[in-house]
């Protein structure tokens, strides 16, 4: 492993899937963005 994370950050990364934890909110944010931008594009 490399990067700027210290020992605790690296250990956390081994046991927690951050992508899975964040992906739901990420997708929700894209849906909100699409809803806001789509009417303006017409």
Image: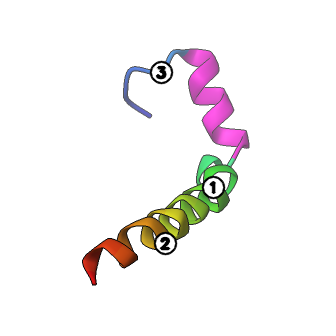
Q: Position of residue 38 (x, y in %)?
A: 37, 77
Element type where label 1 sits in the image = helix
Tell me, yes or no, whether the two marked residues, 1 and 2, touch with CB atoms within 8 Å: no
Give the vertical position of 17 relative to 38 (above or below). Answer: above
Badge 2 crowding class, 10 Å Cα cut-off, few under 14, some 14 to 19, many 20 or more, is few
Side (left or right) of 37 relative to 41: right
Give the label, 1 or 3, closer to the camera: 1
Q: Main secondary structure of the magenta part?
A: helix
* Residue nearest the observer in this picture, 19 or 35: 35
* Residue nearest the observer in this picture, 26 or 37: 37
* Residue nearest the observer in this picture, 40 or 34: 40
Residue labelled with disc 3:
5
Q: Quadrant of residue 24?
A: bottom right
* Residue nearest the observer in this picture, 4 or 25: 25
User: In the picture, which quadrant includes the C terminus?
Assistant: bottom left
Tell me, yes or no, whether the two marked residues, 3 and 2, touch with CB atoms within 8 Å: no
| Numbered label attached to residue 35 | 2
């Amino acid at each position: 492993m490399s990067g700027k994370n210290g020992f605790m950050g690296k250990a956390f990364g081994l046991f927690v899937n951050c992508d899975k934890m964040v992906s739901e909110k990420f997708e929700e944010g894209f849906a909100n963005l699409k809803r806001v931008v789509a009417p303006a594009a017409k």
